[in-house]
Image: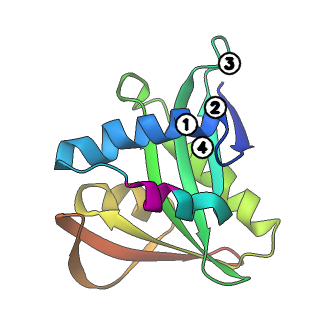
Amino acid sequence: MPTFREISHQSADYDATVILRERILRQPLGLAFTEAELAAESNDHHLAAFDDGSEELIGCLVFTPLSDDEWKMRQVAVVENRRGEGIGRILVYLAEGFARCRGVRTIVLHARAEVVPFYLALGYSVEGDPFVEVTIPHRRMRKRLDS
């Protein structure tokens, strides 16, 4: 079972999540993080999953507080060779608990079209029309944590 923990912005673990997110989420689209984008993450919550034996980073996500009771989940990534093991699902469930303990009542996210079924299975609902973000189709999704 992987271990999960919050990591600090600008730590070595954070740097590893940036590399992972860039490789999985940005490079396939021909994009790269800017210094301004990474600096803007200083007030975000960064959660990561590590392999129990090697302590190698295997997954991560970012929470951006939108208000005291609503956070945006974004940049969810799991390393390619560990997909299908439930790491993403567990990471999202634990992240929801992390948020709930901090008074968050609603999580919103912009899901890439191909992962909408993943979030639907976790209790998220689709809102509004499809839109394009970072060059690809997305759907806005929401989950109330107190329901």
Q: Is residue 55 left or right of residue 88?
A: right
Q: Which residue is mark 4?
A: 90
Q: Amino acid at mark 3?
A: Asp
Residue 15 — which label? 1
Dot 2 corresponds to which residue?
A: 12
Return the residue nearer the eye: 119 or 12: 12
Q: Is residue 121 visible?
A: no
Where is residue 128, by image quadrant?
bottom left
Q: Badge 2, how many Cα within 10 Å: few under 14, some, many 20+?
A: few
Q: CA distance from mark 2 to mark 4?
A: 23 Å
Q: Label 2 amino acid? A: Ala
User: Which of label 2 and label 3 is nearer to you?
Assistant: 2
N-terminal-most mark, 3 or 1? 1
Are the two marked residues, 2 and 1, in contact with CB atoms closer than 8 angstroms?
Answer: yes
Tell me, yes or no, whether the highlighted magenta stretch contains residue 36: yes
**Which residue matches tag 3?**
52
Res. 144 image quadrant: bottom right
- Specify the segment rendered in magenta: 34-38
Measure how far apart labels 2 and 3 are at the Cα level: 18 Å
Image coordinates of residue 65 in percent, x first then y, are: 64, 74
Q: Nearer the viewer, mark 3 or mark 4?
A: 3
Going by the numbered disc 1, the residue's amino acid type is Asp
Q: Depth check: 123 or 104 in front?
A: 104
Q: Residue furthest top?
A: 53
